Image (cartoon, rainbow, N blue to C red):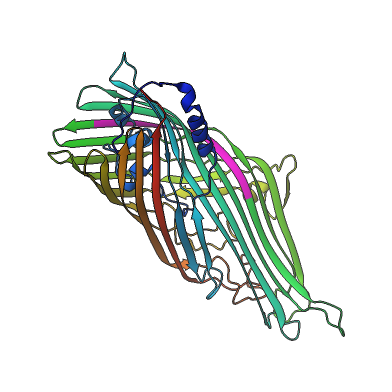
Amino acid sequence: MLMILTPGLKNKTDFLPLILFALLLMLRHEPVQAQGGRYWDQNLNSEAALLSGAVVAGESGIAAIYYNPATISEMTKNNLSLSANLASLYYFKAQDALGTDFPADRTQLSIYPRIITLTLNPKKKPDLTIEMAYFTKTNEYLQINRGISFSDEIISSNPGDEYYTGEYYLRSKFQDYYGGAGFGYKLSNSVALGFSGLISYKDDQYYNLVTASAFTPPDDINTAQYLSDSRFHLKYNMYDVRLITKLGLHLKQDLWSFGANINFPSIKIFGNGTVVKQFEYSNIHKESGSTEGSEKYYAGRQKKCPAHFKDPLSIAAGANFYSSTGKSILLFTAEYFFGLSTFDYIEASNDPGEDGYNFSPVEAGEWLTFSTHQNPVFNAGIAFKKIVNSDLMLSGGFRTDFNYMDSGDESQFMEYNSKMSYSLNVYHLNYGLGYNFKRGSITLGMQFSYGQEKNQRQIVNFTEPVEFISDILMPLTGPLHNQVLVRYLDVSVYFGFLFNFMKE
């Protein structure tokens, strides 16, 4: 989007309410759902979004500090800008995830992140442009609450049918806020370098509860009630503050522009969290027909566990081709993310510490530590931009969004500490138009996102309950099968508003 931005304020008090309003907008965030495990799930501002993020070689607008800091040098006006976007309607369904014909699904309307920036171009150093920014890189939210009940003969030692209930509850929220500064410096009319240093605040909250019960209700004749039940409970909340640095290069030659950047591995500053894990069952007969029930209770709690949300090394490159008139642009960007070997992202110790406890068959460090790894990923995007006139622009693009987590993990969920989630690849298609006015621009567009994965493992099986199978499977649930079909569909409407608060 082309903007006519002018330095200086004619009357600073006239724009104070607008600035305060902008800051309030930035502080009031709504959750945005996106399946975890992907790097390219969101774009920062509406201009870059409609170009599907393929802007490493330029055209990223105020999001240059993130996509390629060298392109900050293309902004030669002092401005304070806000980019706000509207809504996303997503649909997520994991067919058979909780049992045959018992899906885990969710439909939700959400609000996309916003970005606020301050750009300064010193008069004494016209080749230098400085940008300060605050934005939300990731804001994911997922909540699933499903229950089931029926009657069947489940407990062989108890004659007749029992009533059966199963409950599954999942709430996951992950946010990643960025704030910092960067600069772009023109070495010549065709070469520019850039650097950005951003502080990332990552906040992860997770709660998972699985319960199953088989029972007989009391009646007028027999007041005694038979009850067998089991429960798995896992929750944590943590935060991590990290330094993220990026080095960029921008080249121009004839009808082409080229861009490249290196995103260095993040550096931990500080952060920790609290984790609680419990597993219990009562009146469970491990041998069929046995009249002797077994009980078990394992639990642990620990706070101030070091948290490690690592960001890998990545290298991005892009190229833009401009028509001879400059009104048509073809853009291409690709980025390679290096993998991360297994590391602890919740690092519990063997000493539970103050307000902590450990009643498990292993040391607290083993019971409560969470480990993960990230596979290498290569993503690419292509886009076009058509400038109809000085006020109107058309654009669109397509990008891949491959997942860096393992999607086919065969482990039972009782065996290891991990989020209960499905990982899948997603593809994004964008198109829309932008209108420029004297103090900013308005963007209207849409994004369609789709992904699916077959033959995934069930989280839990409530539809074929068995009293006891093994010590690694929750009692009163059934064997797990690789029959889950996961689908993710997102339709996003961009109604972007970018306004410059500075005026000549």
Residue range of the region highlighted in magenta in the rendering? 236-250
| In the image: residue 163, left or right of residue 336 | right
Q: Is residue 452 magenta?
A: no
> What secondary structure is the stretch in magenta mostly built from?
strand
* Front one among 249 and 357: 249
Residue 43 seen in this snapshot: no
Is residue 480 depicted above or below 221 in this figure? above
Q: Is residue 249 magenta?
A: yes
| In the image: residue 483, left or right of residue 399 | right
Residue 108 seen in this snapshot: yes
| In the image: residue 67, left or right of residue 239 | left
Q: Quadrant of the N terminus?
A: top left
The residue that appears at 14% across and 36% down in the rendered structure is 255
The residue that appears at 46% across and 47% down in the rendered structure is 112
In the image, residue 376 lies at what x, y percent?
A: 37, 48
Is residue 339 depicted above or below 485 in this figure? above
All told, the count of numbered labels is 0
Furthest-top residue in view?
Answer: 124
Is residue 447 depicted above or below 79 in this figure? below
* Front one among 462 and 58: 58
The image quadrant that residue 462 belongs to is: bottom right
In the image, residue 217 lies at what x, y percent?
A: 79, 78
The residue that appears at 13% across and 33% down in the rendered structure is 254
* Front one among 366 and 175: 175
In the image, residue 361 lies at what x, y percent?
A: 69, 55
In the image, residue 248 lies at what x, y percent?
A: 31, 31
Q: Quadrant of the C terminus?
A: top left
